[in-house]
Amino acid sequence: MFRKMSLLVVMLLAVAVFAAKIEIFSWWTAGGEAEGLQELFNIFSKANPGVEIINATVAGGAGAQAKAVLKTRMLGGDPPDTFQVHAGHELIDTWVKTGFMEPITFLYKQEGWDKAMPKGILDIVSYNGELWSVPVNIHRANVLWYNKAIFDKYGLKPPTTFEEFFQVADVLKSHGVIPFALGTKDGWEAAHAFETVLIGKLGAEGYKGLWTGETKWSDPRVTDALETFAKMLTYVNPDHSARTWDEACALIAEGKAAMNIMGDWAVGYFYAKNFKDFGWTLAPGNAGIFDALSDSFGLPKGAKNRDTVIAFLKVLGSKEGQVAFNLKKGSIPARTDVDKSLFPEYQRSAMDDWLKHEIVPSVMHGAAASEGWVTEFKDVISLFVARPDVKVTQKALINIAISQGVAQ
């Protein structure tokens, strides 16, 4: 009898040890984002000692490679315990409507997140009356970053219009400085920059209308955006196809290039590299507009370690977790009840703008359109970088919209 009980205890302990782990899937490997993820791990480990964290990262900005790996695992019945996903269409269309996620409305009510996060964020993680993921941040996509020392050296002011952008770019080019740093290695970075050009040419309502059919892709303003972007591409570094987004930011930090259009994960990269001489303004024509996206994590159906996932999600939604993560990441908390004074100048300005600027959803980061549309949009703009044919590209964009069921 004693032997049987001892064997049972050993078996129970073995099960407990086996269960004391969590696999967290993301694409956060670059400077700033990797440090932010580690902060979340540190907080989780302190509250859950003995739980093994499996950091299942797949390198590639914006999930360029990770999404394909995740899809294979999800469809194959081997989901990670939790995974990074952009809130909005990427979350709802790809994983919620198809039945792969478990709702976590109970956590929002239990932890008070439904009162700590604004309605706009709650709406994009909601479907059929349930909440499906925890947003850990708010990113701004439409920022123009610049090297302050270079601008000071040549007496330049950061451009706010396209006309000013080209004037500044011509001065920089005449002095042998790369005007516009770009990395297109992962395929999404050019589409990200073009997204801001569309916003600059169409305005907030015109840009949002592209994804609903209220604005046609045949609109002359889209033609203007493509022509403008083609001109902008004449000022980029010749090795852009060999560089990722963070390697393009490195050109700014190293003083080899002057400007870059990227989301505010760039500031996390600058922090990680201890580069402080950067300035920022909005991308040309984007005044008063906040191009938004959010990283979030949910609870997949069939997660092997459900209880540890719930414990990790609690860290993501907590004040402590959101402050620690976003200080490193460069983004701002999804919660509105954090102490703004804890953050550096850029993030304080983003917090202010989030409350007063007009919000538009980022297409390249899963908030504005379905994953299929995003992929086709990305691929068309990648081809445009190699062969900037405005007429052919605009026709392709029109056809993509039609294929997505949006009348043109």
Image (cartoon, grey):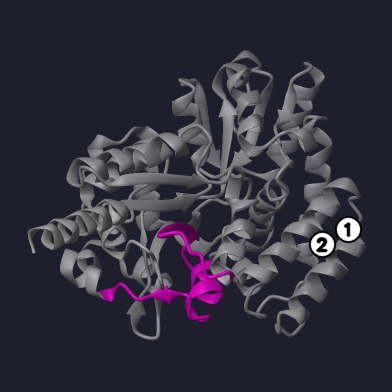
Identity, as a three-letter code, of the amino acid under mark 2: Thr
Q: Is residue 50 above or below residue 5?
A: above
Upstream in sequence: badge 1 or badge 2: 2
Taking the image as shown, residue 183 lies to the left or right of residue 305, namely right
Name the residue that disc number 1 marks.
Answer: 390
Q: Which residues are magenta?
A: 76-105
Q: Is residue 293 above or below residue 408?
A: above
- For marks 1 and 2, give the CA distance: 7 Å
Please tell me which residue is depicted at 62% across the width and 13% down the height of the picture.
153
Name the residue that disc number 2 marks.
Answer: 223
Could you tell me if residue 374 is visible in this image?
Answer: yes
Q: Secondary structure at mark 1?
A: helix
Magenta region includes residue 144: no
Taking the image as shown, residue 283 lies to the left or right of residue 279, namely right
Residue 304, labelled with which disc? none
Image coordinates of residue 58 in percent, x first then y, are 57, 46
Decide which of 193, 312 is in the foreground and name it. Answer: 312
Identity, as a three-letter code, of the amino acid under mark 1: Val
Dividing the image into 4 quarters, which one contains the C terminus?
Answer: bottom right
Q: Secondary structure at mark 2?
A: helix
